[in-house]
Image: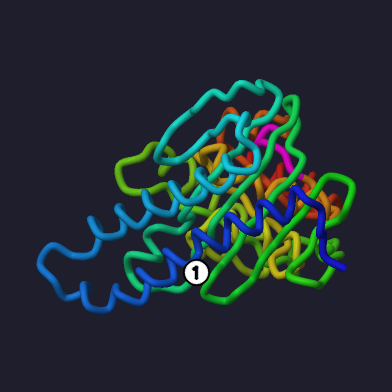
C-alpha cells in the first residue's frame, strides 16, 4: 500500500494543485507553437505560477520550513532543520515543445538528510513517492530497482548539457565509453523522472553532470528506497553540492563509475 502519512499527504496535495496549472497550460501550447515569439515566455509564467502554488500549499501546513527552489532561490525558514527542494517543472524544454515528459519534484531535507521525495508526471498520472524507511512507490505499486548484473544488457539514461553550459567536452568523452559497453543509452530530458525510472527498473542506471539540488533531491530518496545506489561521479556523496550524479542498482554501480571515468 502506498504511503499515506500526514507528510506525504501534504506533498501530494501540493503536487496536485501545481499539476492543474501545468496540465491546463500544456493544453494551450498547441496554439502557441506557430507564433513568432514561440511558447518560451508563456512557459516561464507557467513555471512561476506552479512554483508559487507549491510554496503556498507547503507553507500552509509546514509554515516554518525553508525552501530551495529553481525560480525563487533559497528562502530561509524559522525551522533551520527542515528544507523543501522544489522544481515545479522538471523537463521545461520538453514542455515547451509539447513533449508530455515532464514532472513536478518535491524533496524534503531534515537535519541535513533527505527524508522524503515526490515526483509527479501529471500527463501520465504517475506519482512516484518515498519516505525514508517506508519504501518507494509508483501510485499503489511498490518499486524496486532492476537486478541486471552485466553492463552489456543494461539500458542507461543520461543528460546532455544545455546549450551554453559547460561540460560538453566531458560528456562527449564519456558517452562513447558507456555506449561501447551497454545495451543502449537514452536521453529523455527530465532528471527527476530519470531517477524514478531507475527506481522502477525501467532504466538500469542514470548519469548526468551539472544538475541542481532541486533536480535530484526527490528522486534520490525514491531511488534509495527502491534499493538503488547513488553517488557523485567520483563515487562520493557530493551529488547535491557538485551536481554530478550516478544512480543505479548496487551491482552495476562500480562498473559504471569505472566506465564513465575512463
Residue furthest left as drawn: 36
Position of the N terminus, as image quadrant, is bottom right
Position of the C terminus, as image quadrant, is top right
User: Which stretch is magenta?
Assistant: 230-234
Image position, residue 253 (x, y; %): 78, 48
Whether residue 153 appears in magenta in the rendering, the answer is: no
Instruction: State whether residue 176 appears in this view.
Output: no
Q: Residue at x 48, y 55 (%)?
A: 90
Q: Where is mark 1, residue-wise?
A: 101
Left or right: where 157 falls relative to 44: right
As displayed, is residue 7 above or below residue 110?
below
Image position, residue 2 (x, y; %): 82, 65
Left or right: where 11 falls relative to 39: right
As displayed, is residue 66 above or below residue 154?
above
Image position, residue 19 (x, y; %): 50, 64
Q: Which of 196 and 107 is in front in this view?
A: 107
Whether residue 232 appears in magenta in the rendering, the answer is: yes
As displayed, is residue 132 above or below residue 140?
above
Magenta span dominant secondary structure: loop
Amino acid at each position: 500500500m502506498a504511503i499515506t502519512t500526514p507528510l506525504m499527504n501534504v506533498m501530494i496535495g501540493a503536487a496536485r494543485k501545481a499539476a492543474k496549472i501545468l496540465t491546463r497550460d500544456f493544453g494551450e501550447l498547441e496554439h502557441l507553437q506557430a507564433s513568432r515569439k514561440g511558447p518560451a515566455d508563456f512557459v516561464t509564467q507557467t513555471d512561476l505560477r506552479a512554483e508559487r502554488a507549491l510554496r503556498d500549499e507547503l507553507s500552509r501546513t509546514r509554515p516554518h520550513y525553508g525552501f530551495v527552489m529553481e525560480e525563487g532561490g533559497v528562502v530561509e525558514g524559522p525551522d533551520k532543520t527542515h528544507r523543501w527542494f522544489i522544481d515545479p517543472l522538471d523537463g521545461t524544454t520538453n514542455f515547451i515543445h509539447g513533449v508530455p515528459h515532464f514532472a513536478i519534484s518535491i524533496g524534503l531535507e531534515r537535519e541535513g538528510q533527505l527524508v522524503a521525495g515526490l515526483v509527479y508526471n501529471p500527463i501520465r498520472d504517475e506519482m512516484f513517492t518515498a519516505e525514508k524507511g517506508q519504501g518507494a512507490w509508483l501510485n499503489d505499486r511498490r518499486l524496486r530497482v532492476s537486478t541486471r548484473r552485466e553492463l552489456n544488457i543494461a539500458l542507461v539514461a543520461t543528460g546532455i548539457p544545455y546549450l551554453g553550459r559547460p561540460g560538453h567536452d566531458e560528456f562527449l568523452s564519456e558517452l562513447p565509453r558507456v555506449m561501447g559497453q551497454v545495451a543502449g543509452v537514452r536521453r529523455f530530458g527530465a532528471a527527476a523522472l530519470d531517477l524514478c525510472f531507475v527506481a522502477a527498473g525501467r532504466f538500469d542506471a542514470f548519469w548526468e553532470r551539472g544538475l541542481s539540488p532541486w533536480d535530484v533531491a526527490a528522486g534520490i530518496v525514491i531511488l534509495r528506497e527502491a534499493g538503488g545506489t547513488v553517488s557523485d561521479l567520483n563515487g562520493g556523496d557530493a551529488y547535491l553540492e557538485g551536481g554530478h550524479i550516478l544512480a543505479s542498482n548496487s551491482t552495476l554501480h562500480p562498473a559504471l563509475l569505472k566506465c564513465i571515468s575512463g
